[in-house]
Amino acid sequence: MDWMARQFNRAGYRVILVRYPSRSLDGDAIEQDYLARIIARENTRRGRPLHFVAHSLGAVVTHRYLQDHAPPNLGRCVFIGTPHHGTELADIIGRKMPRVLKLIGPAAASLNTLGDSLTRSLRPPRFPAGIIMGDRSNYPFLSPFIPGADDGVVAVRSGIVAGARDTVVLHEAHVEMIRSPEVFRQTRCFIETGTFDHRRPVPKQGRIALGRPGGLR
């Protein structure tokens, strides 16, 4: 999320970047030991809104936290490429790829579509949430396992959640979308207005790969 954080810094926002060891912790530990603690420590200007921008696993953890522990100064939230209903890739990895299971860690592995999924406790958000999903895959060998349009990791329909204020689907891939100028533009638009810009997107610009994908703010 480093690139996205820099864009918001340049736009005048104070950014709190939450880093966590996703390959070694489950979702509960990430939520309690990292997200909750950092919010309690860093959210000192309670008279100003605290917005959240989160991607993939980070967005699931953020959603789970906010539905029960929303701070009084909660602003708006943008969830990017989020498997709210799990992803079929986690199902396959859990059944057939034990080595990959160890590599991605317990939190990501639990984003399945089965009954024990990390997403099973998610409820429709009662906070202002916007959803950005992608429909471009850079992994043609994975997309056949995902029903419908997908971003190479998550099906578009898996990201749609009842109760969201607005949803937009962009021609973006799962990992690359957090370094996309158009995703940043739409994210900032929702943070500042409460809706996405549903007019025709601006032409794609060059992308700069900075930092590592994952994490949340």
Image (cartoon, grey):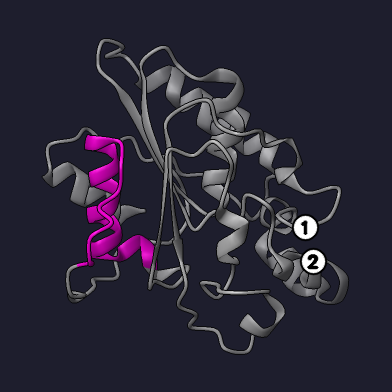
- Residue 2's image quarter? bottom left
Residue 143 covered by magenta stretch: no
Residue sitting at x 79%, y 73%: 92
Q: Secondary structure at mark 2?
A: helix
Mark 1 touches mark 2? (CB < 8 Å) = yes
Residue 91 got which mark? 2
- Which is more toward the observer, 121 or 110? 121
Q: In whole angstroms, how far apart are the C-alphas of marks 1 and 2?
A: 7 Å
Residue 217 makes an appearance in the image: no
User: Which three-letter amino acid code belongs to the residue tagged 2?
Assistant: Asp
Q: Residue at x 68, y 74 (%)?
A: 147
Q: Nearer the viewer, residue 93 or 120?
A: 120
Please identify the quarter of the rendering in which residue 41 is found. top left
Q: Position of residue 130 (x, y in %)?
A: 41, 43
Looking at the picture, how far across and down is residue 63, in whole percent?
56, 36
Badge 1 element: loop
Q: Residue at x 61, y 34 (%)?
A: 124
Horizontal arrangement in the rendering, residue 64 relative to residue 128 (left or right): right
Q: Residues within 10 Å of mark 2 (few under 14, many from 20)?
A: some
In the picture, the disc for residue 113 is 1
Q: Amino acid at mark 1?
A: Thr
Question: Hey, which quadrant is residue 203 in on the image?
Answer: bottom left
What stretch of residues is rendered in magenta? 177-201
86 on left or right of 215: right
Q: Residue 175, how many percent across, how many down?
A: 45, 68
Magenta segment includes 184: yes
